[in-house]
Image (spheres, coloured by chain):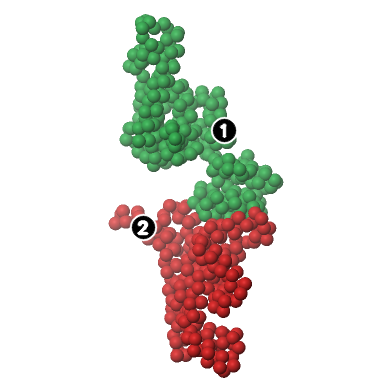
Amino acid sequence: MDSLSNIFSVSYFLEALPRLARTLGLTLQLSAVSAVFALILGCATAIIRFYRVPVLRQITGVYLSIFRSTPLMPQLFLFYFGLATVSTFIRDMDAITAACIIMSLHQGSYMAENIRGALLSVDDGQKEAAASLGFSSLQTMFRVILPQATRVALPPLFNDFVSILKMSSVVFVVGVTDLMGQARIISGNSGRYFEVYVAVMVLYWVIVNLMNVFQRWLERRCAEAY
Amino acid sequence: MRRIAALALSLGLTLGLAACSGGGDAASTPAPDAETTPSQAAETSESTEKDTLVVVTGGGTFNPYSYTDEETGELKGFEADMWNELSSRLSDRYDVTIESTTFDAIWGMLDSGRADVAACFFGVNDERLEKYNASIPYAGDPIAVGVLADSGITALADLSGKTVGVAAGSAALDELESRAEELGCTVQPYETFTEVMQDLSLGRIDACANDIIAIHTYNTTGADISILDERLTQSQTAYFVRKDDASAAKLEDINEALQSMLDDGTVAEYCVTWFGDDLTVNR
């Protein structure tokens, strides 16, 4: 027992938990804002690629190939520190804004492909039926295809939201002390890494499982229409 | 392999030094046998009186304190220079051997009696003094504040209302957080010191705090950071020996040689070579 409490001190764990929880607000705010913008960006990109809109399609192709094919950390580092050497706009930007921009761009590129897949899953007959009723192509998109695609897209999109929450743990790189950043500070000072990282996992676990409850409720509501 | 190479090298070095000092003796008191070379004379006449002194320092990549040169396998760095010089100053009484090992194993070497002196820019603190005896302090690695050259910040009092970047887990973070109110500054933690320096050079933060040697190391990579003369902490580094009578006698001799190196500026010279600044204390 003695050696076990040396490795993992329950009292230190309980002491670290509230200190970490204080940064939850920032982590949630960062993730929520990024999720909204990623969703908007993902939808727009998916629709552009679904309809093969000329010019815009090439632009989104470049965007996807950069942000979907490279890791988040160097993207954030190069944007916040690298581009700041040539742009005063980025130099004056605060770190939280920069983190939100890069996280939105990064996860938006994944969402775009998930949403495009959902759009493709809607049967062509639906489009033909809408056309025969005299719907314009925009009307068809927003009143026929998107509502049906939403139901298919929900599970992968929630995966994306969970990813955003967890990827926010890299923002300490630009000096934003989020949940993970606070964990690094506390554990670096005390040298008690196990307790702190278990506490971090517990907090993330609770949030993600609350998200799961919401996801199941939303899926049930979408299913009611069928 | 590295240890064997280091051992062979230090052995060769001590023999070489013995030869040098032997040469001096041979000149003052003519050798009885003209056939014997000075070095042999030194070996035979002094080996019975000479004590051994095994020094252990860090090996590998503990740059700039003590590290192994990749190509030659030679031990380099501040402590290597210090002990090469100390070896020669102690050579009339001791056969000095310099060993290197991983940073963690240094104290184990000392505890087990495989080494007599632990030498790796170790700071003096109460826990260490409880277990070991320390030499006179020879240098320090205090926590210092770095600013951009044109910032107008010249003293700790100027930090009021400013933002100071520090790396998570560093001693500087602890120190600054406890004094943030007194100094009136905002403490901004980052993941590592790399990002602190990025934001400092971009002007997003006003100052950085870290061990002075870490800041100096940054300046060698092209940055131009001014270090405030006022330090956040005082620190002293010393050599450590076991708490026994034999070690106490050796420590006295080491202290004497060390003091002579502090007095004639040798330690200051090595500090400037390896750390970019004179960090000596106790002059």
**Looking at the picture, which amino acid does disc 1 mark?**
Val
Instruction: Name the spot of residue B7 as percent of width and height, x first.
Output: 37, 30
Q: Is B144 placed left or right of A86 in the picture?
A: left
- Per the rendering, the colour in which chain B appears is green
**Looking at the picture, which amino acid does disc 2 mark?**
Phe
Q: Are marks 2 and 1 in contact (CB under 8 Å)?
A: no
Same chain letter for marks 2 and 1? no
Q: Which quadrant of the view contains residue B120?
A: top left
- Tell us which disc is closer to us: 2 or 1: 1
Q: Residue at x 52, y 85 (%)?
A: A145
In depth, the one of B135 and B72 nearer the eye is B72
Residue B191 lies, with reference to residue B46, above or below; the image says below
In depth, the one of B227 and A68 nearer the eye is A68
**How many numbered marks appear?**
2
> Could you say which disc has been placed on residue A8 in the image?
2
Q: Could you tell me which secondary element the residue under label 1 belongs to?
A: helix
Taking the view exactly as shown, the residue that stands out farthest to the bottom is A133
Graded by Cα atoms within 10 Å as few (under 14), some (14 to 19) or many (20 or more), the crowding at tag 2 reads: some
Q: Residue at x 40, y 27 (%)?
A: B10
Instruction: Name the spot of residue B271 as percent of width and height, x first.
Output: 54, 33
Residue B58 lies, with reference to residue A10, above or below; the image says above
Measure how far apart labels 2 and 1 are at the Cα level.
44 Å
Instruction: Name the spot of residue A162 as percent of width and height, x first.
Output: 47, 71
Q: Which residue is mark 1?
A: B272
Q: Quadrant of the C terminus of chain A?
A: bottom left
